[in-house]
Amino acid sequence: MTMPHSIRQKRHTWLPAVFLTLPLLILLILGLVPTIAAINLALQNRVLRYSDSDYVGFANFLRLFGDRRFVNAVQVSAIWEVVTVAGSLIVGVLLAVFLFERVKGRTRDIIALLLIVPVLLPRVSAAFIWKFMYSPLMGILNWLLEIVGLGGTALLSDPVTALYAVALVDIWQWGLFFGAVILKLLETLSAEPLEAARLDYASTLQVYAYIALPMLKVPIMSLVFIKMVESLRSFDLIYVMTKGGPGISTETLDMYAYAQGIGLMGKVSYASSMAVLMMLATTVIFTLLWKRVAKWEN
């Protein structure tokens, strides 16, 4: 007996809602409750050493713009975001193109698998390994620099180079991973457009810059979004390698918030105002970028 069309349509319509409602409700609660609590805390003058607190409105937010250390943390976070995201993307694209052009068959698959290993390594472990490698006395990087006459350089102790030295570790993990992902994306492309471009005497750079990579712009932008979100969670890597130093040259916004809220200061409301402001800024920026990507898709 054939089921009436209306019943099939109704069952098809409501079945996804039945399975998705509860998980989405749980995610909504897990997202909204901490957010509301953080906003409520940011509107107070709560300090860990005292049991009482009062509502002070937007006083904490107004203080932020006069806090030179906060402004420095925003600048460091912006530099970190740009360097790690752009560096990972550039390394990933160059590595993927090189492997796609030069390596074939099973060897390429093995190399792609090896490229994923660094990102699977815990960040704290990677930080300790690279911190030892950066050692001016016993580190292998210092030995390599000595070969070219630049030995004895304490990269993590120099305010000019410390942030970029730590960023190199992040790029090492994510750039190699991006290389493996973009390599597999290149393998999904049709060979005809690339071969036609080469028949028209296009160089390798032109083939990838004007044909192959534009065809992959949407998945590549998705990778960029993932890396942008991941780069905001840089606390563990920077804390292990420099603890925000020397001075405050590598102190990102999350590290400054930690120092104010959980450290000796105990100003949890002030730290919460930083987190709320960071949440609002990233939400606006990511929304604008996502709309741009959506236009590319259309």
Image: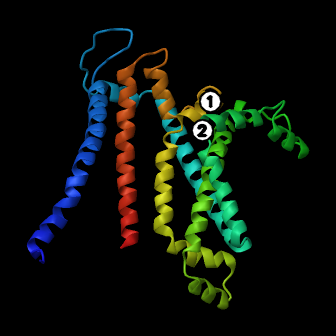
Q: Residue at x 56, y 33 (%)?
A: 236
Q: Which mark is residue 123?
A: 2
Task: List the residue tagged with mark 1.
Answer: 240
Nearer the camera: disc 1 or disc 2: 2
Q: Nearer the viewer, residue 230 or 282?
A: 230
Question: Relative to residue 267, is residue 185 drawn left or right?
Answer: right
Residue 189: name its quadrant.
bottom right
Q: Is residue 50 left or right of residue 133?
A: left
Compare residues 41 and 128 and report the one nearer the observer: 128
Q: Position of residue 279 (x, y in %)?
A: 37, 40
Q: Is residue 258 visible?
A: yes
Q: Between disc 1 and disc 2, whose residue precedes?
A: 2
Image quarter where the N terminus lies is bottom left
Question: Which quadrant would the C terminus be assigned to in this image?
Answer: bottom left
Q: Secondary structure at mark 2?
A: helix
Q: Residue at x 60, y 55 (%)?
A: 177
SS for dot 1: helix
Q: Position of residue 135 (x, y in %)?
A: 78, 32
Q: Is residue 139 left or right of residue 56?
A: right
Task: Name the residue: 27% across, 14% down.
Answer: 53
Residue 198 drawn above or below residue 265: below
| 71 lies above or below 195 | above
Q: Amino acid at mark 2?
A: Arg
What x and y, as percent, mark residue 131?
71, 33
Q: Residue at x 47, y 30 (%)?
A: 70
Q: Are marks 1 and 2 in contact (CB under 8 Å)?
A: yes
> Which x, y percent locates residue 84?
58, 48
Residue at the far front: name it: 1
